Amino acid sequence: MPLFNIPIPDFLKPKPSETPVLNVCMMGPRSVGKTTVLTSIFFETQDSVCGSKLYMKALDTNTEKLINYHTMLVDAVEKGNAANLPASNTESNFKFGLGLKGQQPTLHLNVQDFPGEYLISKRSEVNDYMAKATVVLIAIDTPYMMEENGYYNVQKNKVDIVTKYLKDNPSSIKDKLVLFVPLKCELYAHEGRIESVTEKVKETYSDLIEYFKQNNIASFVTPIHTLGGMEFDKMVDNTSGIGDVEKIATYRPYIAKPKYAPLFCPQPLYYLLTYVTNYYQWQKTQKKDGFLSGIMDSIYSFFMHDEVFFEEVQKICKYIIYNKNGFSAVTGNSILRLN
Ligand SMILES: Nc1nc2c(ncn2[C@@H]2O[C@H](COP(=O)(O)OP(=O)(O)OP(=O)(O)O)[C@@H](O)[C@H]2O)c(=O)[nH]1
Ligand SMILES: [Mg+2]
């Protein structure tokens, strides 16, 4: 279906040197698996994003390393020894290109992750980035939230700091999409208790959720399994002194011959792309001062010169999970349309 009745003049089309950038802000404690989750998301979408004509590729060597890290993860899981799990790339900025197969990327995706303590020590850096981001992911170390009555949760997941930080910066987060992403939750899925993880997220972040309702922020719980073959075993004393926590979670193989079996990892990407198309359509209805300024002051104008790309991105919506396997809507807003 054509997007517009009037053709877009050439001078309004973005030049190749101005490939638009979508920013994603990932927050989460040290060692929660932020980098591992990005590995799993992007490994699965290199050739094709859920069977569509879209591909996602690494744009710099740092991002290539991330994708190679995948091989080490597969090996570590197959050896069944959680202690073998390699520490990931220490870099925290990753650049990807999203485009139609056989063509240059139409869009760049910039993902930056910030460990929880940056919300104190690098406040303005995080805020500048968050202001430019379309989607904010809050990665949660699930065993710390679920085990021992959540005794170590505040310490590990820095719930109070994350809540205060977001509440202090409403202009940077208003109208956006926030995904709560419980990680390392294989045990709860294996035991048929994944819904209790979702409920616990809603309870833990209830203050923040109330604030989302007042600021037109859409939010979801999206539990994903980054490894699959490993599950939580027990909490032990942290003798290494690393990570600012009293206890550390240990993991065991789920079965005798575990396999690397990530599940649902590309979901945050599907949410992001759907949100962007929805945002684009919503933004057009918000502009009071004419068609031209609506195009000129928005990065979303890239959709206008590429109908095929826009339509492919729109198709991703049907792959979104939002009401099973622990996935759940938390707050809606005037932008997101899932059907
Ligand atoms: N058992 C288990 N280990 C995991 C999982 N995901 C990641 N890890 C391991 O946890 C460690 C930390 O993972 P990273 O992806 O580096 O975590 P991060 O959040 O990027 O860490 P920082 O950048 O240091 O804050 C690595 O040794 C991973 O192999 C998981 O789902 N289960
Ligand atoms: Mg990392």
Image: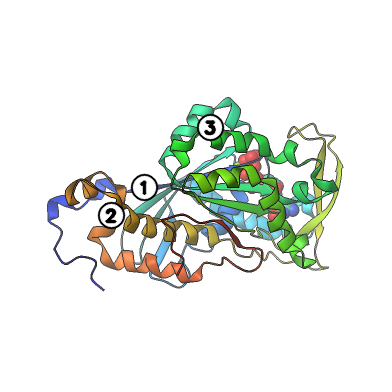
Secondary structure category for the residue under label 2: helix
Q: Position of residue 109 (x, y in %)?
A: 42, 50
The label on residue 1 is: none
Instruction: Tell me if I can see residue 106 in this picture.
Output: no
**Mark 2 or mark 1, whichever is nearer to me:** 2
Q: Residue at x 79, y 49 (%)?
A: 83
The kind of residue tagged 2 is: Lys
Observer able to see residue 66: yes
Please report the residue visible at 65 percent of the width from the left and 46 percent of the height from the top. Answer: 206
What's the CA distance linking mark 2 and mark 1?
19 Å
Left or right position of 44 against 2: right
Which residue is the site of mark 2? 284
Q: Dot 3, how many residues are within 10 Å of its Cα: few (below 14), some (14-19), or many (20+)?
A: few
Compared with 219, 262 (above or below) is below
Q: What is the spatial separation of the Cα atoms under label 3 and label 2, in whole angstroms?
A: 28 Å
Q: Tell me the residue at 37%/55% (across/down).
A: 279
Q: Position of residue 17 (x, y in %)?
A: 25, 46
Return the residue at label 1.
21
Q: Quadrant of the N terminus?
A: bottom left
Circle 2 residues within 10 Å: few <14, some 14–19, many ≥20: some
Tell me the mark number nearer the camera, choosing from 3 and 1.
Answer: 3
Q: Where residue 168 is drawn, which disc sits there?
A: 3
Q: Tell me if label 3 and label 1 are in contact, CB under 8 Å.
A: no
